[in-house]
Image: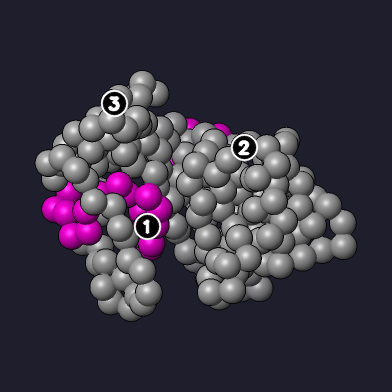
Amino acid sequence: GKEIMDTGADIVLITNASWGEPRQELLDQFAPFAPVDRQRWVNYSYRVMAEPSHFRVEGSALVASRFPMTRTGMVHFGTSERQQVLSQSSSNLGWVMFIEIELTPDDPTDAPLVVWFVDMPSNPARSRQEVMREARGAIGSWDGRGWTMGRHVWEQSHQEDASFPEPDLIMGDFNTPRGSDSLGRLAPGMKDAFAQAGYGRAGSWRPEARSR
């Protein structure tokens, strides 16, 4: 966590963050995003000496942000069954979560930044086109259930007629080769931010089987 903070990152996603004490340690390391003088509950299991609106812990995802978050929703797709591929245990389960982030919280007329956080199935034997098609299907079937930020705690919400908001930014563990045509199925018309303005290490997922 400290190494990430030292890079000056504004929004951080940890996928598959270990449960229990390791996850709590990560939250504590990101507390400087919005420190306060007392512990606040992030969810039913974790607390942090910071404003809860800057943190979201849901399922295997941990998100920390320099800016406050106001609303979130999440969809899952695939199956929980793991598969042995080339002596490795690979996942067939994926998820996509949106979070609305207030970049200018003092200006209520300014639209929030919508970020999609993703963790795609890691099974390299699966077609990436199929994976992205399943992800898009799950997004389109979102039932409006999610969480909104209350005064000091995340509260469950249900907006029956709501749709999964389209993203300004997508980040996470795509488990997909950079430049794959399949990414256009998930995010048509969007550009690779790293290609435009990134520096340092880029994505490094390299499948050992054909999976485009």
Q: Residue 64's x, y, as percent? A: 59, 58
Q: Secondary structure at mark 2?
A: loop
Classify mark 1: helix, strand or loop: strand
Alpha-carbon span between mark 3 and mark 2:
24 Å
The residue at the point 76 percent across, 59 percent down is 50
Q: Which residue is mark 3?
A: 84
Residue drawn at point x = 38 percent, y = 62 percent: 169
Secondary structure at badge 3 equals strand
Kindly indicate whether the residue at mark 2 contacts the one at mark 3 (C-beta within 8 angstroms).
no
Front position among marks 3 and 1? 3
In space, the residues marked 2 and 1 are separated at their CA atoms by 24 Å
Residue farthest along the right direction in this orientation: 37
Tag 1 or tag 3, which sits nearer the N-term?
3
Magenta segment, which residues? 158-185
- Res 96 quadrant in image: top left
Amino acid type, mark 1: Ile
Q: Pointer 3: residues within 10 angstroms few (<14), some, or many (20+)?
A: few
Residue 161 as seen in the image, left or right of residue 175: right
Residue matched to label 2: 19
Q: Residue furthest front?
A: 87
Q: CA–CA distance between discs 3 and 1? A: 29 Å
Instruction: Provide the major secondary structure of the magenta segment.
Output: loop
Q: Nearer the viewer, mark 2 or mark 1?
A: 2
Task: Point out the tag, 3 or 2, that comes first from the N-terminus.
Answer: 2
Q: Which residue is mark 1?
A: 170
